[in-house]
Every structure is written in structure tokens, then in C-alpha cells.
Image (cartoon, rainbow, N blue to C red):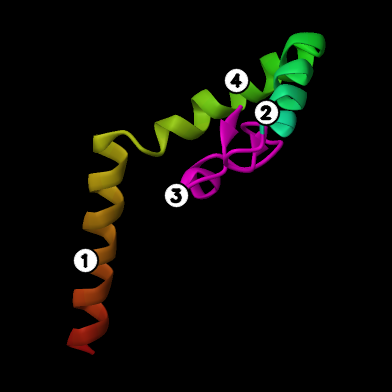
Amino acid sequence: MAADVGGIAEGLRPEEHALLFPRGDAAAAAGALRRVLEDSSGTDARVARARLRAEDFRLGPYLQAQERFVLDAARALAR
């Protein structure tokens, strides 16, 4: 669970990876925490998906994606 601030929702998709609540909304945060504690199988599934999602943000995959982008752009410019 996390407050939906900054780029959080871009990295962690609501419901798929995390339970997001509006910044400063204590009632919504409490509701999300209740869901985390009461639905262990749903929580476990979200955590597993979030771990896989985190792999996309490791340095190696990020640099590979950037390299592909630059090479594709260079090929497009060369045409």
C-alpha cells in the first residue's frame, strides 16, 4: 500500500501491484491497511507481482532498453 503521490502509480499499478490511497487520506490508508491484513492471499499475489515489476527498474534492464531506443532512433534517422 502506498500514497498515490508523484510517480508511484506509474511504477505500481493500482490493485495489480499495490493498494494506493490519496495523500493525506487517513481513512483510505486505514482501509488499505485493513485489506492488506485481512486478505493475505490477495496481498501475497500483489507482492509477487510487484517484485516482478521491480525487475523492470533494475539498472541492467533499464540500460538495455535505453540502448535499444538509441539504436532504433539512429536507424530511423539513417533512412
**Contact, mark 4 vs mark 2 (Cβ under 8 Å):** no
The dot on residue 48 is: 4
Query: Nearer the viewer's eye, disc 3 or disc 2?
Result: 2
Disc number lying in front (1 or 4)? 4
Distance of label 1 from label 4 (alpha carbons)? 32 Å
Tell me which residue sits at (55%, 39%) in the image.
12
Q: CA distance from mark 4 to mark 2?
A: 21 Å
Real-space CA distance between mark 3 and mark 4, rounded to the nearest whole angstrom? 23 Å
**Residue contact between numbered discs 3 and 4, judged by CB atoms under 8 Å:** no
Q: Nearer the viewer, mark 4 or mark 2?
A: 2
Among numbered discs 3 and 2, the one appearing first in the sequence = 3
Q: Is 73 placed left or right of 32 in the picture?
A: left
Residue drawn at the location 49% of the way across and 43% of the way down: 8
Q: Quadrant of residue 75?
A: bottom left
Q: Nearer the viewer, residue 9 or 5?
A: 5
Real-space Cα separation, disc 3 to disc 2, in angstroms = 17 Å
Q: Which residue is identified by label 2?
A: 29
Task: Name the amino acid type tagged 3.
Answer: Gly
Task: Indicate left or right for 53 with 48 as reference.
Answer: left
Q: Which mark is residue 70?
A: 1
- Return the residue at label 3: 6
- Mark with earlier residue (1, 3): 3
